[in-house]
Image (spheres, rainbow, N blue to C red):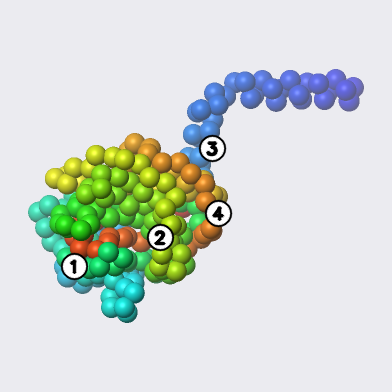
Amino acid sequence: MEKRSMNRMIKSLIGAIIAVPLGLGTIAAQAETVSSPQEWSFDHEEPVALPSEFSIGTLFDGRPAGDWQILATERAKSPPHVLAQLMAKGAEHAYKVVLLKDVIVSDLNLQVSFLPTQGRADMGGGLIWRAADDRNYYLARANPLEQNIRVYRVVKGVRHLLENFNQTIDVRRWHTLRITQQGCHVSIFFDDKQVLDLCDKTYHAGMIGLWTKSDAVTYFDDLQLQYVK
């Protein structure tokens, strides 16, 4: 009896596995682990001020890492406001960083829309995640001048390139940059197209944030975060 019961159990398990298409089963399992998104549209904040939950980093010389402020503009993706980095000057390694200081997350889906508006040495911007502070974090950034998307590991303020993808980036319109990370596995999406896929085990959890470099002036809108359990 015990052997027959075991055989029936094995057959039932095999039948259940066969009955579920692998792709759909994987998608469903992932969907169940994702929380409702947190969103920052910046539309209910006062212009000029920086939302209280955001904290500006420091440059290598101790000055604030950029002029980050809420900006009222007709160019907003979701009007009337954007979060803008407006400091239009800076050295090659002047990283303009703003962090959500009370958000600590490990596995996540993180997305933002950005509009590159100005910059001769550099343009565009990116997303920061698993940040210990403003000098140690992961970074995915899109640069219209170089026409590429890159992922970096930043350690003590020094960038280490992990992956590069050449991509045409139109400076006349908004774009979306999204990252997902579970464990060491990182996927990068640009305008809803996956462009990079890699594994890195350096950082395990931390803050999220936004980034520009040098003289890049960039608008950000509709920042979204989902926790993955």
Instruction: Determine the CA span between mark 4 and mark 2.
Output: 16 Å
Q: Residue furthest right?
A: 1
> Which one is closest to the eye, mark 1 or mark 4?
1
* Mark 3, secondary structure of its residue: helix
> Which one is closest to the eye, mark 4 or mark 2?
2
- Upstream in sequence: badge 1 or badge 2: 1
Instruction: Determine the CA span between mark 1 and mark 4.
Output: 34 Å
Instruction: Determine the CA span between mark 1 and mark 3.
Output: 46 Å
- The correct choice, above or below, for 63 with respect to 3 in the image is below
**Circle 2: residue type:** Arg
**Circle 1: residue type:** Lys
Position of residue 146 measured from the top left corner of the image (x, y, whole percent): 25, 48
User: Residue 89 — which label?
Assistant: 1
Position of residue 122 measured from the top left corner of the image (x, y, whole percent): 22, 57
- Residue named by callout 4: 201
Mark 4 touching mark 2, by CB under 8 A?
no
> Which one is closest to the eye, mark 2 or mark 3?
2
Q: Nearer the viewer, residue 228 or 121?
A: 121
- Upstream in sequence: badge 2 or badge 3: 3
Position of residue 108 measured from the top left corner of the image (x, y, whole percent): 46, 51
Instruction: Determine the CA span between mark 3 and mark 4.
Output: 23 Å
User: Is residue 109 at all visible to an observer of this figure?
Assistant: no
Q: Residues within 10 Å of mark 4 (few under 14, many from 20)?
A: few
- Residue named by callout 2: 159
Instruction: Determine the CA span between mark 1 and mark 2.
Output: 20 Å
Residue at 22 percent across and 68 percent down: it is: 90
> Which one is closest to the eye, mark 1 or mark 3?
1
Residue at 38 percent across and 45 percent down: it is: 164
- Residue named by callout 3: 29
